[in-house]
Image (spheres, rainbow, N blue to C red):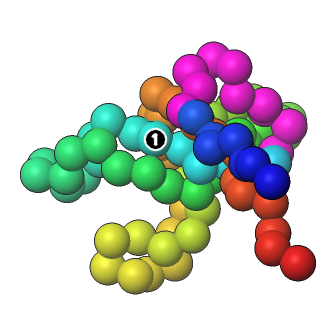
């Protein structure tokens, strides 16, 4: 049985339906020495009478292991692996 290794895909091809993905970002805007990194995130749409905004958001834990959700600018993505049963 062979498995196909996931490959990084350009962010323009990522689904924007709210599913969680693995995102690759070139740098973290608040940490100067942190180079390319991966994060777990999804596309967020905020549509209220007061605001209309869409962006990629990292979901999970930050580099100090604190819960966080922050706006990120990924360049590539790949799907999450299927759960092992």
The residue sitting at 70% across, 54% down in the picture is 80
* 1 on left or right of 62: right
**Would you place residue 45 above or below residue 81 in this image?**
above
The span picked out in magenta is: 8-18
Q: Where is residue 41 in the image (x, y as percent from the top left)?
A: 62, 52
Q: Toward the viewer: 79 or 70?
A: 79
**Would you place residue 84 above or below residue 12 in this image?**
below
Q: Which residue lies furthest to the top in this view?
A: 12
Label 1 belongs to which residue? 24
Q: Toward the viewer: 8 or 38?
A: 8
**In the rendered image, is residue 57 in sight?**
no
The residue sitting at 11% across, 52% down in the picture is 33
The residue sitting at 43% across, 81% down in the picture is 66
In which quadrant will I find the C terminus?
bottom right
Mark 1, other Cα within 10 Å: few <14 / some 14–19 / many ≥20: many
Q: Number of marks in the image? A: 1
Q: In which quarter of the image is residue 62?
A: bottom left
The residue sitting at 81% across, 69% down in the picture is 83
In which quadrant will I find the N terminus?
bottom right
Please check the rendered image and state whether residue 39 is part of the magenta-colored stretch, yes or no: no
Q: Where is residue 43 in the image (x, y as percent from the top left)?
A: 71, 40
Q: Position of residue 59 (x, y in %)?
A: 60, 62
Helix, strand, or loop for circle 1?
strand
Q: Toward the viewer: 49 or 42?
A: 42
Q: Which residue lies furthest to the bottom in this view?
A: 65
* 83 on left or right of 55: right
């Amino acid at each position: 049985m062979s498995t196909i290794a996931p490959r990084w895909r350009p962010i323009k091809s990522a689904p924007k339906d709210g599913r969680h993905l693995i995102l690759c970002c070139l740098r973290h805007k608040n940490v100067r020495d942190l180079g390319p990194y991966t994060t777990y995130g999804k596309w967020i749409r905020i549509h209220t009478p007061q605001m209309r905004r869409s962006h990629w958001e990292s979901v999970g834990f930050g580099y100090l292991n604190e819960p966080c959700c922050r706006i990120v600018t990924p360049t590539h993505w790949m799907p999450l692996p299927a759960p092992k049963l």
